[in-house]
Image (spheres, grey):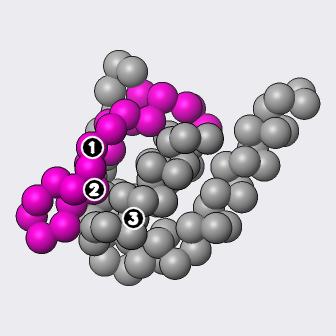
Amino acid sequence: MKELKRIEDGLKKSNTLLYKTDDKGLACSFVNGGLVVDSFVVEDNVIADALAKKGMNGVVEGSNFSMLRNNYDWFSLHVKTKKLYETLK
């Protein structure tokens, strides 16, 4: 769950998330004031799907970004629950 921690850190340091589907997963860039604060690829499909649903056209900003940052514990719990469910299947 290293990727979840990195997402949490990125949310704290930025105000916009840009993402794009890549051959390795979901390429994410956290932006603050026009500068990229952090950039990495989320390889876990469950995390990538959940994160992609938070934005529109590859961007999470404004109220959607604030809701993701403020409710990150619920987002993380949702992802962990889905991972556990897939494991138990």
**85 with respect to 49 (left or right):** right
Q: Position of residue 35 (x, y in %)?
A: 11, 59
Mark sitting earlier along the chain (2/1): 2
Q: Which residue is mark 1?
A: 39
Dot 1 crowding, Cα within 10 Å, few <14, some 14–19, many 20+: some
Q: Which residue is mark 3?
A: 11
The residues tagged by marks 2 and 3 sit, at their Cα atoms, a distance apart of: 7 Å
Query: What secondary structure is found at the residue carrying circle 1?
Result: strand
Magenta segment range?
25-46
Most common secondary structure along the magenta stretch: strand
**8 with respect to 59 (left or right):** right
Q: State yes or no: residue 34 in magenta.
A: yes
Residue at 26%, 50% (x, y): give it: 38
Residue at 41%, 78% (x, y): give it: 66
In the image, farthest residue toward the left: 34
Whether residues under marks 2 and 1 lie with C-beta atoms below 8 angstroms apart, the answer is yes
Q: Position of residue 30 (x, y in %)?
A: 27, 56
Q: 3 or 43, which is in the foreground?
A: 3
Dot 2 crowding, Cα within 10 Å, few <14, some 14–19, many 20+: many
Q: Which residue is mark 2?
A: 30
Question: Type of residue at label 3?
Answer: Leu
**45 with respect to 57 (left or right):** right
Locate the N terminus and report the quarter of the image it occupies.
top right
